[in-house]
Amino acid sequence: MRSTFRILFYINKNKVKADGTTAILCRISIDGKQTVLTTGIYCKPDEWNAQKGIIRTDRENNKLIAFRQRLEETYRHILKEQGVISSELLKNTITGVNSVPAYLLEAGKVELERLRVRSIEINSTSTYRQSKLSQLNLQEFLYDRGIKDIAFADIHEELGESFKIYLKTVHNRKPGYINKCLTWLNRLIYIAVDQEVLRSNPLEEVSYEKKEPARHRYISKSDLKRIMETPMSDPRLELVRRVFIFSSLTGLAYVDMQRLYPKHIGKTSEGRLYIRKQRVKTKVEAFIPLHPIAGQILFLYNTTDENKPVFPLPVRDKIWYDINQIGVAMGLKENLSYHQSRHSFGTLAISAGLSIESIARMMGHANISTTQGYAQITEQKISQDMDKLIERRKIIYK
């Protein structure tokens, strides 16, 4: 069914500029829904013909005629390309502020730019970087199909399923990676739905991949000892090394380290230092008695000024390569990441015989089942060690 489309030009006589002119406004009505935009054209109130909606001076009226033609041509183009039109969509297209173009990759570029600006505002680029990677995967997929872009109106369920297969087979991606790319694709489509470019998401029935059970990566006790015994000559790397050790001994995530203030540090009646702090992620309070080495590191930094955090840390994105560089300097087999410190704390605490309940309290877990994941890792490690012992004994007794 074809949309009902009407245009009405009018002026507001109560808003006259110092030069005696007033703005000509345009009311767009499509299927009973209205929106108003300014034409950028001005005239004096006595030059406006309200009955005909025209300007009495030919020069200015020609501008108004051109504006009407542009509106009508844009209306026809959107209706032809997308099969759906709204007053808000037409307005946004005309004014150039439409955040959702008619094509998928084009819309991705717009959203990426918004995320880039947002990353500067919040001083974190992680979402922007992940979205940029997902956009690149989407672009490569479409190019592989022999198309440079695809109109939102041409997107069907097959596209989503094919995108999954492409990521699995061509790039051998794992479920978590595939799901992030699908999330980006759905994000762009839902933005288009919100802006009434599409009536609904054609990929609603496309299921996400079943994720593999989480594997907590951690470093061994011997590797942690090596990091402790190897100071860095570069001040920034030395700061990162110290906070990595501190997190390995306290279980604090990087964001909690950034927001650790002297007020979170206390002493028991026996003089034992501890940290009591609500975790940023779970909003659960963590209570952590401090290991003596963690206490030594703590007093190298701010423990008195409540207006400043304990550690002078940058955002995590800025130490991404610093952590990796420390791992390379240590000769570690796997890439070192900051979050391994927290996982190492959980795993080593389980290995040392601490109760699940105590570890959950120290790590600020909202659900104890999260903590139990570390116990499973330890049991698996015990089984692997026993298998190795059995193999060695076989060799001895041959």
Image (cartoon, rainbow, N blue to C red):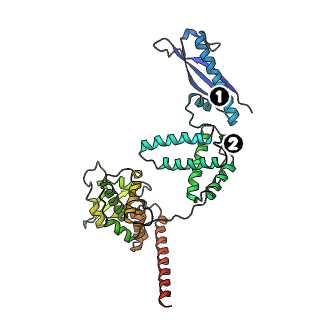
Q: How far is disc 1 from disc 2 in space, using C-alphas?
A: 19 Å
Task: Give SS at disc 2.
Answer: helix
Give the image location of residue 372, x and y in percent. 48, 68
- The amino acid type, in three-letter code, at marker 2 is Asp
Q: Residue at x 61, y 55 (%)?
A: 167
Instruction: Give the class, few, some or many, for how many residues have Cα within 10 Å of label 1's Cα (few <14, many ≥20).
Output: some
Q: Is residue 326 left or right of residue 41?
A: left
Q: Amino acid at mark 1?
A: Thr
* Between 324 and 14, the one nearer to me in the picture: 324
**Residue named by callout 1:** 74
Position of 322 relative to 225 (above/below): above
Residue at x 33% of width, y 57% of height: 237
Q: Secondary structure at mark 1?
A: helix
Q: Position of residue 280 (x, y in %)?
A: 41, 54
Left or right: 30 as drawn, with respect to 270: right
Query: In the displayed structure, would residue 384 be above or below residue 165?
Result: below
